[in-house]
Amino acid sequence: MRDMQKIIALLILVIPAILAGVGVKWMRDSVFGVLNEPFTMTAVQFGVGLAISVAGIWFIGGYILHREKKNKRAAERFQKKENTTVDED
């Protein structure tokens, strides 16, 4: 059961990484004027590539930050703040 969870977690990370790579490829192709199949303009292709790249990198970064917080290895500024309010009497 534990091995299956690790495989699923790996797939959850690989899919956004592949999408980010495809986004970078689409941006590169639009800079060089290569138009890929689903797009009719290179500007749209570049915009979609940029959005996919940012989303993939953001997802992977969020996952890494979540793991680091869970293992208490994240920087202090990323740790959850404890309730530090002072009661005034």
Image (cartoon, rainbow, N blue to C red):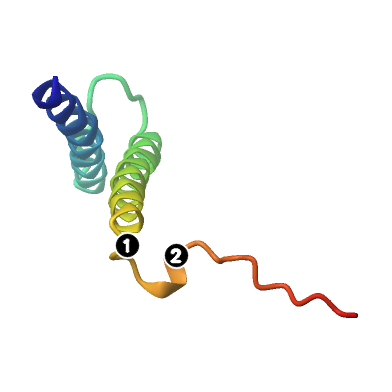
Which is nearer the eye, 10 or 52? 10
Label 2 close to label 1 by CB (< 8 Å): yes
Real-space Cα separation, disc 2 to disc 1, in angstroms: 8 Å
Q: Is residue 28 left or right of residue 83?
A: left
| SS category of the residue bearing label 1 | loop
The circle drawn on residue 79 is 2
Q: Is residue 85 above or below residue 63?
A: below
Within-10-Å neighbours for mark 2: few <14, some 14–19, many 20+ = some
Tag 1: amino acid: Lys
The percent position of residue 88, horizontal first and vertical second, equals 86, 79
Tag 2: amino acid: Gln
The percent position of residue 21, horizontal first and vertical second, equals 18, 40
In this view, the residue farthest toward the left is 3
Tell me what residue is drawn at x 64 percent, y 66 percent: 83
Q: Is residue 47 above or below residue 6?
A: below
Q: Quadrant of residue 38?
A: top left
Which is nearer the eye, 55 or 78? 78
| SS category of the residue bearing label 2 | loop
- Residue to which mark 1 is pinned: 72
Q: Quadrant of residue 10?
A: top left
Tell me what residue is drawn at x 30 percent, y 41 percent: 56
Q: Is residue 80 above or below residue 44?
A: below
Tell me what residue is drawn at x 24 percent, y 41 percent: 20
Quadrant placement of the N terminus: top left
The percent position of residue 19, horizontal first and vertical second, equals 24, 34
Tell me what residue is drawn at x 55 percent, y 66 percent: 81
Sequence order check: which comes first, mark 2 or mark 1?
Answer: 1
The percent position of residue 46, horizontal first and vertical second, equals 34, 42
Q: Quadrant of residue 6?
A: top left
Q: Is residue 16 left or right of residue 50?
A: left
